[in-house]
Image (cartoon, rainbow, N blue to C red):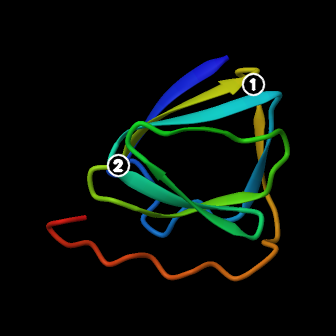
Amino acid sequence: MIVTLVTAARAPEKGTGWHQHRAEFHIVIMQKGWARFMYEDKVTLVAAGDCVHQRPGITHYLFDYSADMEYLEIVGPADFATVEVEGPCAVPPPTPWTKET
């Protein structure tokens, strides 16, 4: 298992792109701020205090996040692979950051 702290400062500016993880277990625990993910063709808002289980092999894309976003990502096994894939749909535009977001 591997635990990674992901912050807005370390996230890709234009999101992660469509991908899948070759893992048996994957959860995201949002500690601060918010992020919007595409899980296949559905937009999912994950806010501070939320915990999301990403089922094995799900096609997803982190495409929008707040300036203060911070989450723990817990994945097993530790030597999991990430594979870029073609997305199933268009991705909404990111939310422009303001002092409130």
The residue most toward the front is 49
Q: Amino acid at mark 1?
A: Asp
Q: Is residue 99 left or right of residue 36?
A: left
What residue is disc 2 on?
69
Q: Which mark is residue 79?
A: 1
Percent position of residue 93, x then y:
50, 82
- Give the quarter of the image for residue 24: top right
Question: Which residue is pictured at 35% across the width and 49% down the height?
Answer: 69
Specify the label residue 70 is tagged with.
Answer: none
Residue drawn at (71%, 64%), measured in percent from left and top?
18
Q: Quadrant of residue 3?
A: top right
Q: Is residue 24 left or right of residue 71?
A: right
Determine whether 3 is above or below 8 in the image. above
Position of residue 98 relative to residue 4, above or below, is below
Nearest to N terminus: mark 2 or mark 1: 2
Which quadrant, please, contains the N terminus? top right
User: Between marks 2 and 1, how big is the CA–CA gap?
Assistant: 25 Å
Q: Secondary structure at mark 2?
A: loop
Judged from this view, the residue extending furthest toward the top is 1
**Horizontal and vertical percent position of residue 28:** 56, 37
Q: Position of residue 98 (x, y in %)?
A: 20, 72
- At label 2, the amino acid type is Met
Q: Is residue 32 above or below residue 92?
A: above
